[in-house]
Amino acid sequence: MNIIVCLKQVPGTNDVRLDPETGSLIREGVPSIINPEDRNALEKALLLREEHGGNVVVISMGPPQAEVALRDALAIGADEAILLCDKAFAGADTLATSFTLGSAIKKLGHFDLVLCGTKTLDGNTGQVGPQLAELLDLPQITYARRVEIQGEILKAERVFEEGYELMETRLPALVTVTREINEPRIPSIDQIMQSYREKEVKTWGAAYLGLYEHSVGLDGSATKMSKIYKPEFGKGKVEFIEGSMEDMAQGLLAKLKERNLI
Amino acid sequence: MEFKLTKEQEAITRMIREFAEKKLAPIATQIDRDAKIPPDIHPELRKLKLFGIPYDKKYGGGGESYIELVLVIEEVAKASAAVSVRLAAHYLAPISLSLYGTEEQKEQCLPKLCSGEDIGSLAFTEAATGSDPEAITTMAELSGDDYILNGSKRFITNAPLDGLAIIFAKTDNGVTAFIVNKNQPGYSTSKPWEMMGLRGGQVADIQLKDVRIPKANLLGPEGKGYRMLTELIAYGKLDMSACLLGIGGAALDEAIKYAKETTARGKPIANFQTIQWLVADIETQVEAARWLVYRLAYLASQGGDIRHQSALTKLFASEMATEVTSKALQVHGSYGYTKEFKIERLYRDARVGEIIEGVSEIQRVIIAASLLR
């Protein structure tokens, strides 16, 4: 079973600070990590490899320093790592990111399964997995909290607020996973050392993938960010509406009507 | 001169921190309260290969240096100083073997120590010794091809845990080191001492009653045990300094967190200069200790005599840990004096630093002696 795991290097904090003048993220002093749900996707890939055999390839689009996240993934157990790194990829929105990742996956050739985290800590859009599935023309299951494979069939529990759906699809497919699917393993000291001393992270650029600059990065993006800012928290009163989903929705509706907001 | 970790070392720090935050931090209060490390933690430490980091791969070690070892101990100590002390005390046994063991002794003992199947201890201290080697009363008498050990040892970390102990006893030729299996007939331990801090470290007394040791288990030259001890304990001071660095780093984290989250008169107390000064002092002291500890680890990895440098590093790191945990507790005000906050535990854990592996006063004597002789 050949499995591809897409992962992103993100700042390992919820307390993201922004440069007030440029609007860019202040990375100084903030350690970078593999996006937590992507770690779950990698863990699932490794568990499936242990069960069915095969190969796990991790792939990430990012700046040169994202190599660290891929080295971590190799230490954790991935067989191969590919960094999609090119100045032309900078400023990509989720569409351009999916397009670049999809192009690299096509270049890799045969695979049975693509696994992604559902969302990233920093972007939190949840768009890359589904867009990637569309670009690769794959069936997709999102928000999976359980995945198992029997022959050519993949079965998954897809979780949502009030329960879960049991779904199944033929392989190849793309699945995005949630944090509850498993507990990611931590590599031993010698696995960490091996990932740096004995393993390779391949770097692929736009030219290698045969991509034109206007189709990737900022130029290939369908959306443009006009401003990024951190909301200022005021001193307002916070009220919690409790109860079932329906009670909470009714309660919210009543509050909004009370203030003539709807 | 390069003051930065390699990418591999950064990765070790990152992964061990993740392990410590996920697996140790949530149970650190329980370990402290029960004075016991839950049995499922040891296999986790073994899986990460934390018991033989600087030793040769041919003996089952990691083939890395003391720098990687202190990074691991530091990160573990940030979450649970008790667990870090199990590691630090363990290492005294493989250090003894790597420095003084014969090839046969290394081949026989190091693989199990490096894998963590055997947990190491080093036993010199007795009820009346302090740091005086002449006061040792544990005796080793030659009987045919064996030595028979009788006596008792005090305050020995990891003493009740299965594995190997390096035990110092007097022969006709003076203080001598022996490799003793802790499961051997005649070896027994007291109930662990109820300690103020580092609770869970399993510090107990050892009783030795007619413990029969083959001659082959004599470690290093007979009668040179005290000289060996001063060299070995220098490595113990390195590992202990790494524990203290972790405790200091955790105190800094707690002080910052509390200062940012707690408000007074509608503002975070981090806005007040009194708090800012305390936090600034804490970081300054922790960073000074950090580079002493890392440098000592570098020197240890190069080989050679580290007794002078380890004395001054442990002296500084222990006083740093006492002072910064006190300052961080001060940032917390009355809350810091309650068991609701981690800083209360850190304050207790830090205090032993000025006593363990030789009191601060002895460290000063060692430093002065090498400067003024």
Image: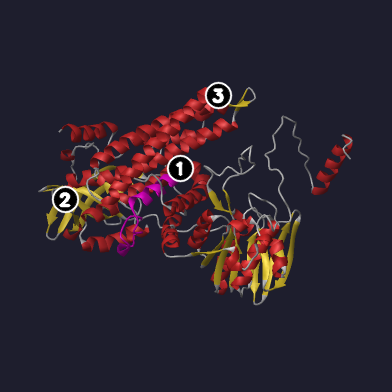
Horizontally, residue A147 falls left or right of residue A260, namely left
Label 3 sits on residue: B272
Chain to which mark 3 belongs: B
Residue B62, magenta (yes or no): yes
Looking at marks 2 and 1 on the same chain, the residue that comes earlier in the sequence is marked by 1
- On the image, the x and y values in percent for residue A35 come to 59, 54
Disc 3 secondary structure class: loop
Label 2 sits on residue: B140
Q: Which marked residue is nearer to the observer: mark 3 or mark 1? A: 3
Mark 1 is on which residue type? Lys
The residue sitting at 52% across, 34% down in the picture is: B256
- Taking B47 as reference, is B314 above or below it? above
Tell me the magenta residue range. B53-76
- Taking A168 as reference, is B167 above or below it? above
- Taking B162 as reference, is B248 above or below it? above
- The one nearer the camera, A190 or A196, is A196
Tell me if mark 3 has few (under 14), some (14-19) or many (20+) residues whose alpha carbon lies within 10 angstroms of its own: few
Would residue B339 be visible to someone looking at this image? Answer: no
The residue sitting at 39% across, 42% down in the picture is: B243
Looking at marks 3 and 1 on the same chain, the residue that comes earlier in the sequence is marked by 1
Instruction: Residue lying at the far left in this picture: please name it.
Output: B172
Q: Which marked residue is nearer to the observer: mark 3 or mark 2? A: 3
Residue B214, magenta (yes or no): no
Horizontally, residue A113 falls left or right of residue B234, namely right
Label 1 sits on residue: B78
- The one nearer the camera, A94 or A138, is A94
Mark 2 is on which residue type? Ala
